[in-house]
Image: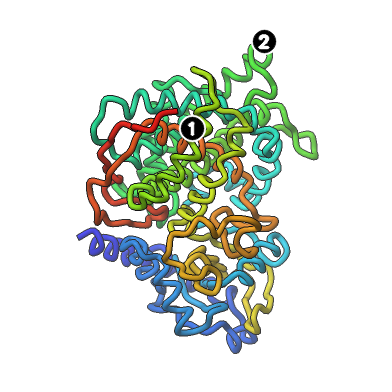
Amino acid sequence: MELFFLCGLTLFILFVSFSLSSLFSSTRKTNGNSQTNLPPGRTGLPFIGESLEFLSTGRKGHPEKFIYDRMAKYSSQIFRTSILGEPTAVVCGAAGNKFLFSNENKLVTAWWPESVNKIFPSSTQTSSKEESKKLRKLLPHFLKPEALQRYVGMMDTIAQRHFETGWEGHQEVAVFPLAKNYTFWVACKVFLSIEDPKHVSKFADPFNVLASGLITIPIDLPGTPFNRAIKASNLIRKELSAIIKQRKIDLAEKKASPTQDILSHMLLTSDENGQYMTELDIADKILGLLIGGHDTASAAITFIVKYLAELPEIYHKVLTEQIEIAKTKAPGELLNWEDIQKMKYSWNVACEVMRLAPPLQGAFREALNEFIYAGFSIPKGWKLYWSASSTHRNPECFPEPEKFDPSRFEGNGPAPYTFVPFGGGPRMCPGKEYARLEILVFMYNIMKRYKWEKLLPDEKIIVDPLPMPAKGLPVRLLPQTTSA
């Protein structure tokens, strides 16, 4: 029934949303020269394209099928399709990843569906692309490794409180919602200096609604995911506005530090023209950070728990590493940066999990001008899509790709542009190190406390757009018998 509803709703929405725009934009998106040498492939049904199959393969838990079927049929380098009403070239393989990541703002630029611009009002004054550029300039100061060192102890404190309130006293738990609570709590502290659990929970539910409706067809009708996302964003924005106003007062009265978090930094930093961001600008950027700062990490954590339940040999190796670190800690002593650097095997395991279940399946770009790639013309305005699956499960990049093997990440690790859960090159996600910290802190705390067993051995995995267990990964908790 879910798939039937998805297909019916998508059919209706795509016809309504794109039929008129297609009449006016078809001549703009392609020209006579480009049409003769487009990448191989097919664009599917009028207006709908191949969106139904693109979406449904994810809902069935196998998003890579859409990619690999077409790589085998058309080309292992590039093929054309139509997704979300847009003519799209899917660029495959390590060479394709390198090309897109290295040509950001030269030949291509980031692109998001119209739903993103509509949910974030400040981006309509410029574009979501320009807002993204501004945000990336702000982040390195706070998210580079030397700046993140001060967050390790704080993350450990939050993790301890998280396990005390959400896990202790329970024989069975659902991992995915708890992982989201943990990563959202950390994000609220790092970006807004909010750590009160009641204040955090006030944000959490509407944020989950917003995240689930962000990458959807932008039809604002009652009951649609997009409509619910807009309502949730307005609710969150109202709360953020109050926080921003209070922070301005606290900064003026020296009750808050200019360097305590990203919110203070945004309030006090001007652009090259001496202009400061408006409250709406700041609210929208914080919204984006909170979504990006917890959604993908929570998916990664959930699948780490899943694979460790399925692979006892890997579990015991991670346990050995974490217990050795725990033995060096005095009672009540928090983790520090040096401890994180010792978690090499644990991070290799996390990377292998993200190879097999990438939190980010891929992303879109838009061609700034017509160019040639792999001998084919890409018209100006076309969308380009890169997929982690085109390399992560490719035997040319990872021998025996279905085998769980953390040793792939020893030494120099995988070849460049083959392992791309955080993008690559100039487009490497600025939050990579932040994600590494919160994932490893979580692993340390769960390994010290528990062993666990999956309650649903064959639980379905869906990708919409993040991978997630259909029932939230319920597990039975058993006390950890190996002590520090």
Quadrant hosting residue 272: top right
Q: In the image, residue 213 lies at what x, y percent?
A: 39, 48
Residue lying at the far left in this picture: please name it.
Answer: 1
**Seen from this angle, which residue lies furthest bottom?**
36
Q: Residue at x 25, y 63 (%)?
A: 3
The image quadrant where one finds the C terminus is top left
Residue drawn at 62 percent across, 15 percent down:
249
Residue 406 seen in the figure = yes
Spatial separation of the CA atoms under disc 1 and disc 2: 24 Å
Residue 105 falls in which quadrant of the image?
A: bottom right
Dot 1 crowding, Cα within 10 Å, few <14, some 14–19, many 20+: many
Q: Nearer the viewer, residue 286 or 164?
A: 164
> Which residue lies under the disc numbered 1?
237
Question: Can residue 188 be seen in this snapshot?
Answer: no
Q: Is residue 40 left or right of residue 476?
A: right
Residue 334 versus residue 435: which sits nearer the camera?
Answer: 334
Q: Is residue 226 above or below residue 424?
A: above
Secondary structure category for the residue under label 2: loop
Amino acid at the residue labelled 1: Arg
Tell me if residue 182 comes above or below residue 331 in the rendering.
below
Q: Say which residue appears at 39% left-offset and 40% top-offset.
A: 208
Query: Horizontally, is 179 left or right of 111 in the view?
Result: left
- Which image quadrant is residue 168 in? top left
For the N terminus, the image quarter is: bottom left
Most distant residue in the right direction: 273
Which mark is drawn over residue 253?
A: 2
Kind of residue at badge 2: Glu
Q: How far across and how far down the image is residue 271, in percent? A: 75, 38
| Residue sitting nearer the eye, 364 or 305 | 305
Pinpoint residue 327: horizontal percent, then vertical percent: 51, 28
Callouts 1 and 2 close, C-beta under 8 Å: no
Per the image, label 1 sits on a secondary structure element best described as helix
